[in-house]
Image (cartoon, rainbow, N blue to C red):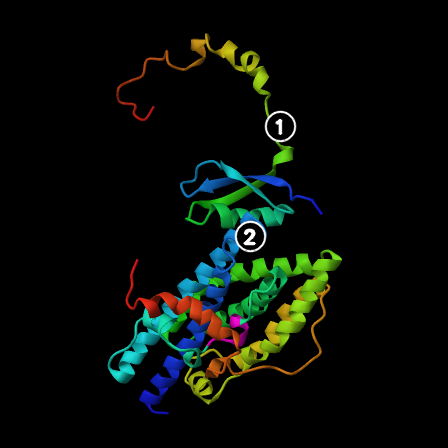
Amino acid sequence: MSARDLDRALFDYLLRLGDSPLILAQRLGAWVGKGPILEEDLALANVGLDLLGQARMWLSYAGEVEARIVGKGRDEDQLAFLRDGGDFRNLLIAEQPNGNFADTITRQFLFDAWHELALDALTRSGDARIAGIAAKSAKEVAYHVERSGDWVIRLGDGTDESHAKMQAAVDRLWTYTGEMFAADDDETALIDAGIAADVRALAAPWRQCVEAVMVEATLAIPASAYMQRGGKQGVHTEHLGFVLAEMQFLQRAYPGARW
Amino acid sequence: MTKEWPLWEIFIRSQHGLAHKHVGSLHAADAPMAIKNARDVYTRRNEGVSIWAVRSAEITASAPGDREALFEPANDKVYRHPTFFPMPDEVKHL
């Protein structure tokens, strides 16, 4: 792969890293004012803002890499607010609807458990910028996974109603966990170059982490092996368009608007 | 179901190594959740290095009605304040 092709792959990879936290942050933001209790309302917003901060770092770097390729790169705001759905590279699980609190917590935990492992691997990236952003983000995500895992156990091993809602959420979201561990040709090239995290190697430790929590939560891991994929290539579920419509409205309607 | 989570009093120790200071209260189902919630509610702006959470019900408070008996006798005992010692000028920060 030529240096230019590697930069193209890197740009796409940085979008993958940045878009998942960006879209999930937007989802979590929708809980503000609607959390089950004040404390949880703030906690969801805090996690969302952590993720938004991480997305900013990844997308800013993506813009710099884009500038190396085409001479002029987009900044973080242009990448976040002016791209169309097909250009987003987030994992499908990030765009799934908030649903009820069990849905949100389950989505969060399945993602956090992967996120923590992926960031840990990225701290050893040969690209110093990637390693730096990952190290900074990893501290935040260590808390995210502790918090969401704690809730999975409380609600799974809670009342009959909370258990039923949690199990339904796990059953519904499980199909979106497969693509977390899939690498296409571009990503494989970056893995071989020592830049990207080898997500294929994360499936086993992720399963171990998730299983430990699920067992304590008395929740069953679905037997179905069918896994959705496409998010990382820009093929999304019908939900992303609605997320973007809300997230991007202001910059689309009033281009360049600032606080 | 009208079961409310119990109330917890939160104490945060600031960056400067001072004693834990009461910052407010919150609801949580148990102690670990109280610590997590305190982290999210009261340390968002880098306020602290340590959190204490105490069940509000576990705090014994003096009764407001006992104020006179408890505190007023101290009013006319100025000799309890260490203000009658001559201090050398060189000693600072007292």
Q: Amino acid at mark 2?
A: Glu
Residue A170: image x %, image y %?
A: 65, 69
Q: Are marks 2 and 1 on the same chain?
A: no
How would you classify the magenta stretch by its main secondary structure? helix
In the current view of this chain or complex, which residue is farthest to the bottom? A1
Q: Is residue A1 above or below residue A150?
A: below
- Seen at 49% across and 59% down, the residue is A47
Q: In which quadrant of the rendered view does residue A85 lie?
A: bottom left
Q: Is residue A48 above or below residue B82?
A: below
Quadrant including the C terminus of chain B: top left
Q: In which quadrant of the rendered view does residue A128 lie?
A: bottom left
Q: CA distance from mark 2 to mark 1?
A: 28 Å
Q: Is residue A33 above or below residue A134?
A: above
Residue A192: image x %, image y %?
A: 44, 86
Q: Nearer the viewer, mark 2 or mark 1?
A: 2
Residue A243: image x %, image y %?
A: 47, 70
- Seen at 34% across and 84% down, the residue is A7
Q: Which residue carries the number 2 mark?
A: A40
Question: Is label 1 in a helix, a strand or a loop?
Answer: loop
Q: Amino acid at mark 1?
A: Thr
Which one is in front, A43 or A250?
A: A250
Q: Which residue carries the number 1 mark?
A: B60
Q: Which residues are the magenta region? A: A90-95
10 Å crowding of disc 2: few (<14), some (14-19), many (20+)? many
Which one is in front, A113 or A161?
A: A161
